[in-house]
Image (cartoon, helix red, strand yellow):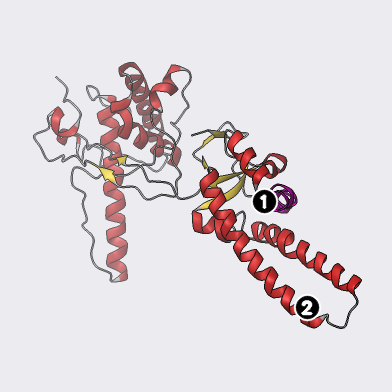
Amino acid sequence: MNELVTGDAVVLGLRPARLPSRALAIAIDLAVLLTVFVLLSIGLAVATVTLDEAATAAIAVAMFLLVLVGGPVAVETLSHGRSLGKLACGLRVVRDDGGPIRFRHALVRGAMGMVEILATFGVVGCIASLVSARGRRLGDVFAGTLVVRERVPAGRARAVPPPPPWLVGRFAQLDLSGVPDGLWLAIRQYLTRMDQLDAVVRDSLAEQLSSDLASRTGVPVPQGVPAAAYLAAVVNERQARDVRRVAAAAGRSGRAPVPAALPASVPVSVPVSVPVYGGLSGAHQADAHPADVRPVGGTTHAEGSTDGSGAGGQAATGFAPPA
């Protein structure tokens, strides 16, 4: 998968579409356009039967440009890059930086498409797509666009490991209102992927995240508590508060009651495309991002939820109690 990088140096999890899927989408679009073109031609032939040949030819050329060139341009502009064929194949046209296309992008693509698809029966477009590393045709190169896949297989996300039983409920009085969402996401991603990291990177990230979390809460990390276990316990406490808040709201609205407390383990699926908080450099990034970046839009399921109701050993929670 080729990585797309925005101007802010953010790697986007977009998968460029290849020739087979693009060819199928174009075939569907052409079938629809040709059907509309034939129907309009028959209607205009009946309506312009009294006109001379020059007027009839001018109307035919105008209709050809309007339907076979203006039609795709209008559809891609109004649908932000999703024609009927691309919608059926799960594709979308986006800018090189991943943003939605505008009229000028669709216009350049439509004008070039008349040459490389209609005039040459798709030969030029197929050759350009095969040569391009990201499957782009000439219209995409000149317009600065890319056709990407919207429907990709959803990867399996890992569950956040539960905290050790001896830490459950220990941070019930902790003030978590000052912790930003970005830090929560970074902590959850770290907890789901810490087994994949190098030991040195894992420990340094845990210390950094726990220090940031402690500075946001105003309470230092308790002595003798491992940084990773501290992070898991605080995340578990926040989840418990969220569940109690939802249960209270459901009780006031008369809906079915929700359990007011969380068990020791609450798996949370976190897409691996969330960047690690604070950023990594060099070899740290190689260790922290072993998996491909995946689109946010797919539904994933947690794998292997860990039961935290054991005796508190490392095998049950992933954290060893202090000596």
Q: Which residue is mark 2?
A: 45
Residue 266 tag number: none
Could you tell me if residue 50 is visible in this image?
Answer: yes
As drawn, 109 above or below 216: below
Secondary structure state at the residue bearing disc 1: loop
Mark earlier in primary sequence (1, 2): 2
Tell me where residue 244 appears, x and y as whole percent.
27, 54
Question: Across the whole image, how many numbered discs are drawn on residues?
Answer: 2
| Residue 231, x across and y down, in percent | 30, 32
Residue that numbered label 1 is attached to: 121
Q: Nearer the viewer, residue 29 or 182?
A: 29
57 left or right, relative to 222: right
The span shown in magenta is 101-121
**Residue at point 18% right, 43% down?**
264
How crowded is the residue under tag 1: few (<14 C-alpha within 10 Å), some, or many (20+)?
few
Q: Is residue 8 left or right of residue 39?
A: left
Q: Are marks 1 and 2 in contact (CB under 8 Å)?
A: no
Q: Identify the amino acid type marked 2.
A: Ala
- Looking at the rendered structure, the kind of residue marked 1 is Phe
Q: Is residue 110 magenta?
A: yes
Residue at coordinates 30% horizontally, 18% vertically from top-left?
A: 199
